[in-house]
Image (cartoon, coloured by chain):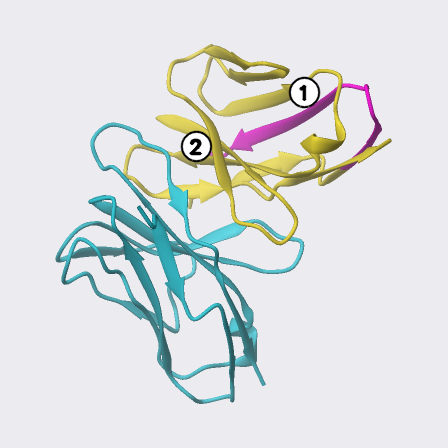
Amino acid sequence: GQQVMQIPQYQHVQEGEDFTTYCNSSTTLSNIQWYKQRPGGHPVFLIQLVKSGEVKKQKRLTFQFGEAKKNSSLHITATQTTDVGTYFCAGSSGTYKYIFGTGTRLKVLA
Amino acid sequence: NAGVTQTPKFQVLKTGQSMTLQCAQDMNHEYMSWYRQDPGMGLRLIHYSVGAGITDQGEVPNGYNVSRSTTEDFPLRLLSAAPSQTSVYFCASGQRQGYQPQHFGDGTRLSIL
């Protein structure tokens, strides 16, 4: 079955440093979504990528979808303490069945 | 709008007991899903539905039943609770047309002794 892996599992950065998490699917995806979950909270939608090679930006966050539509990345520039949380990717092969990645837990040290 | 409402927020069960986790949404979303999240892990899809009367299995469906008699409600039933089902359960909903984001409820924290 479809599997979605994310690396790294944990990342500690100093405030102001950059952060990147990578997502890899075992199958070609029709679309990929990114979510952020704060400690004790629920996942909150960040963005969706649909097109091969697509790049989207949200302020300090840059999202990329691979050319083969099997991988994606989230890059945060100049992290802030408000960026703390776990970032998940969720991929679908077009069946409305979303498989979540294992997540990357980000800690930002002030 | 209340969004996605899950009840109860916390529940403790004994092994072998059954119970139903409730999920309701007021956004007229066709798509609804149930996930479980174990400590330090990602979300695993249990069951999902693309509309009333339609359900399908996710990654980890064993031990759980669902039904979708209305657009608003998508209850998750544990048939005979086992300690391995101790987890946080999230319900989510979204528009079916196109690829739409999922809106999550606050979760139900379930412990099975």
**SS of the residue at dot 2?**
loop
Q: Nearer the viewer, mark 2 or mark 1?
A: 1
- Where residue B90 appears, x then y in whole percent? 45, 56
Amino acid type, mark 2: Thr
Check if residue A51 falls in the magenta segment. no
Residue indicated by mark 1: A76
Residue at x-position 42% and y-position 46%: A1
Q: Which chain is yellow?
A: A
With B55 as the anchor, is A20 left or right in this view? Answer: right
Q: Is residue B79 visible?
A: yes
- Where residue A43 appears, x then y in whole percent? 51, 44
**Going from the N terminus, do you reach mark 2 or mark 1 first?**
2
Q: Which chain is cyan?
A: B
Q: Nearer the viewer, residue B75 or B26?
A: B26
Q: Quadrant of residue A85?
A: top right
| Predominant SS of the magenta segment | strand
Distance from Cα at disc 2 to Cα at disc 1: 26 Å
Indicate whether A78 appears above or below B42. above
Check if residue A17 falls in the magenta segment. yes
Residue indicated by mark 2: A27
- Where residue A60 appears, x then y in whole percent? 64, 15
